[in-house]
Amino acid sequence: MKIGNLYFNIFALITIIFLADGTLYSKEQKKSSSIQIHNSEKNEYLFNDDIMPASDNIRSGHRLGMLNNYRAKNSGRILLEKKHAPIYVPDTVIVFSTEDTSKYSFSFNENGLQISRIVQKLINEQWINENRYSYTYDISGNILTYMEEQWNDIEWVNTLLFTYTYDGNGNVLSDLYQTYDGGQWVNDNRNTYIHDDNGKILTSKYEIWESGDWINEYRETYTYNASGNNILYLYEEWNEGQWVNNRHHTYTHDASGNILTYLAERWINEQWVNYLFYTYTRDMNGNMLVYLLENWITDHWQNSVRYTYTYDSNGNRLSYLHELWSNDQWVNYMRRAYLYDINGNRISDLQESWTNDEWVNYSRKEFVYDANENIIHFTDEFWDTSQWIPYNGNLSIYDYMGHTICNFNGYNISLYYKEAKASEVISGDGGIPGTYRLFQNYPNPFNPTTVIRYLVPAVGTSFMKSVELKIFDILGREIAVLVNGIQSPGMHSIEWNGKNSAGRQVGSGIYFYKLNAGNYTETKKMMLIK
């Protein structure tokens, strides 16, 4: 997935993608997948325009919740952050860009997951088909296939297909990319993954299809400490029949699992040579205060880039200052300021550049929400000497499983929603579910809160059901009891704030939530990061 926020040449130094547990993916890894797989085993985080690890409170990618509220937590990109019923899903989105006007029409399955999206362009005052996207899922909500088609003025024609496989724990094992040629699907490239017992990726391998065979391209290897934090990352390329070192990353963490330092090295002349060094300073809540990047110059580290952040009492980022190191001193380069409504939704994002010893407007984004806190309008503008002009910014939304619903690119975006009540989205007698079901929590990984959804069926002689939902740590010890009582049939959701039964905040790590109801028992895994 591409990030369309403003970038500068200096950012070219940063070429990595953070995983939720602090691990990294190279950008090369992403060329085989146009959608993100978000689960506790593979949850990719990107450096956004703030250039910070996504494990911070304000996470890269602006996730909002499709179940139910779309809330802007960061600039330009929207993360789906489920809060409570009812459920809202996007129906239609109108995007004005500097090149054209587009309409996106969505449909979802009974579990609130996108099954198709049609994109049309406005041409001569008529909506003309352009692309159609289709999705299929397994019973746990993991994406199985993603297909893209193009309109040829008569019918939809296949163009590309992604196919995903998983193990019994929902860890992605492979993703295959194929193109449509000569009436059949033709292999192009694939990724394969190996996980440890905790679902963390140990190795990932990227291959390309050539002359009827899979050819190695590159391999990534991850090493973790006893707390499950990624401490080593190795990237190798396939060259003349063997794996050859390319780059190497080393990480240190604090007691909560937050990254403190990150050393990047390159393989040159049969040895590891320093390249980049990142240092992160945080407050007691884990919020990033200072981000420092240094470059290795011959025999010493030299300052390169520094970011300084401020927050309000709720942990919402208020500003950051971007400085560059020049002539042995820090020089202003860019700064951003954010405003929020009373619900903590970001409503504006103003960026300024340091020009001729003063701050000058550079860009601004604005967000508007409805009464249910769904984002309904987004604008992005660029300062052209004396006035604001349209600028194509990126806005992305995800569903409650973390799958990308869509990435929009435009200067004026309007979003329209439809409410999907439990009786409308869950199959079963009379619209009430016919079996219990426990859904994956969202967001996952999370900090500081997450929401767990489950279904209570209308079966048997008793209409009301006894339900128990508990949290356990990785050692099987009971941490908290979220639900213990009689409930009516239908969709239920509850938020966990990361605290135990004594009201104390628990540490970072893997936790399990277990639903017990009658003879039904189901357990799922989640990850708390700080």
Image: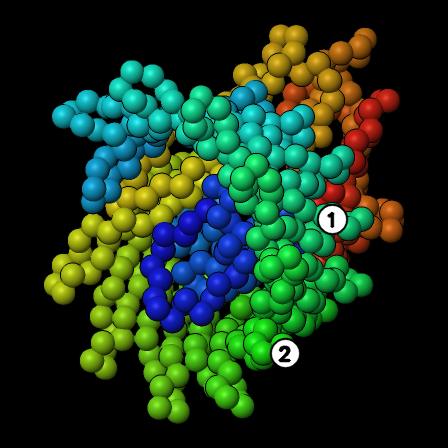
Judging from the image, what secondary structure is the residue with disc 1 in? Answer: strand
List the residue tagged with mark 1: 195
- Residue 171 locus on image (x, y percent): 70, 41
- Which tag is nearer the camera, tag 1 or tag 2? 2
Exactly how many numbered labels are in the figure? Answer: 2
Circle 2: is it few (<14), some (14-19), or many (20+) Cα within 10 Å? Answer: few
- The residue sitting at 24% across, 51% down in the picture is 391
List the residue tagged with mark 2: 271
Give the amino acid at mark 2.
Gln
- Residue 324 locus on image (x, y percent): 38, 79
Q: 528 or 107, which is in the foreground? A: 107
Give the amino acid at mark 1.
His
- Residue 68 locus on image (x, y percent): 51, 34
Q: Quadrant of the C terminus?
A: bottom right
Q: By what rule are the colours in the image chosen?
A: rainbow
- The residue sitting at 52% across, 86% down in the picture is 301
Q: 247 or 9, which is in the foreground? A: 247
Circle 1: is it few (<14), some (14-19), or many (20+) Cα within 10 Å? Answer: some
- When the figure is inspected, residue 361 is found, relative to residue 446, above or below; the finding is below
- The residue sitting at 49% across, 76% down in the picture is 293
Q: Is residue 246 visible?
A: yes
